[in-house]
Amino acid sequence: MKSSRPELKQINLSQKGQEEIVMNSAIRWRIVSLQAVIVVVLAAAAGFAFMQGSFVTSQVRDELTAQQIFFPGTDQVTPGGALDPAKFQQEIRDQAGNQVTDGNQARIYANDFIGVHLQGVAGGKTYAQVSSQASALSKQIGVTPKDDPNYAAMQAQLTTLNAQKTTLFQGETLRGMLLNSYGWWTIGTYTTFAAIGLLLASIAVLGALMFELVVAARRPARIKVAQQVAA
């Protein structure tokens, strides 16, 4: 009974203890089939990655554009302006007058504009810190007689804290949403880069496949196998 396994035909034995083996058609077609499968898998993965990367970046762009967020104009790049060169980095000054439409602009607006302004709202305190301070002061006012000399000052301080709390909440919320957009934009961008890498890999394997079909198939492939020679 003949075996269905592909055979390697030995064609000669050299004096140095090496034998040459001819690759038969069965083995060649197995290699070709494997290469074809790899090409299909890599191409499909590249297409899927392109689609997802494009979808994510398009969604981020559409949502940011709809918010109509603009950097202060170029007339604000002056001492005392909204983009005072002494306070704001060159990166954000270069965006003066532009609309926020992509993830990188969202990051700049969130960190270099909102972040800087939030630092000056309550001496660098966060919303959580100011909120806790306002709650403690509110409780203190609740047990303080209205005729207390400090009562009016405490009320004024609470009003200030509540205003700071509102500003910080709104600012930190917007900053968080913009940074979230930046994160998804980054994912979409790197997904597109991965798609390009997969596409290049599929082209490389396709080239090897075409070589195997067009060039290598015209002549038998010989594989040299080392063989130990008896003393």
Image (tube, rainbow, N blue to C red):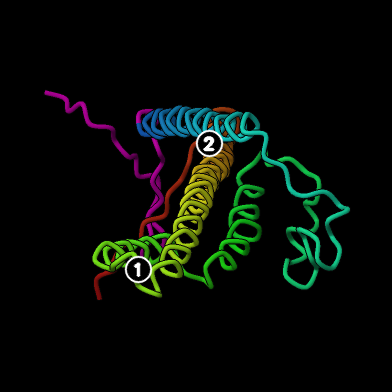
Identify the mark at residue 147; answer none if there is no mark.
Answer: 1
Please provide the residue range marked out in magenta: 1-26
Residue 20 in sight here:
yes
Disc 1 element: loop
In-front residue for pair 85/139: 139
Q: Which residue is mark 2?
A: 202
State the residue at coordinates (80%, 56%): 94
The type of residue carrying mark 1 is Asp
- Give the vertical position of 147 relative to 35 (above or below): below
Which residue is outermost to the front?
A: 147
**Residue 161 at x, y = what percent?**
45, 62
Left or right, residue 14 beside residue 94: left
**Residue 111 at x, y = what percent?**
59, 59
Disc 2 element: helix
State the residue at coordinates (65%, 61%): 112
**Residue 135 at x, y = what percent?**
31, 61
Q: Mark 1 vs mark 2: which is more N-terminal?
A: 1
In-front residue for pair 75/37: 75
**Residue 85 at x, y = what percent?**
80, 68
In-front residue for pair 55/206: 55
Residue 216 in sight here:
no
The magenta stretch spans residue 6: yes
The type of residue carrying mark 2 is Ser
Identify the mark at residue 133; answer none if there is no mark.
Answer: none
Which residue is outermost to the top?
A: 1
The quadrant in which residue 150 appears is: bottom left
**Dividing the image into 4 quarters, which one contains the C terminus?**
bottom left
**Dividing the image into 4 quarters, which one contains the N terminus?**
top left
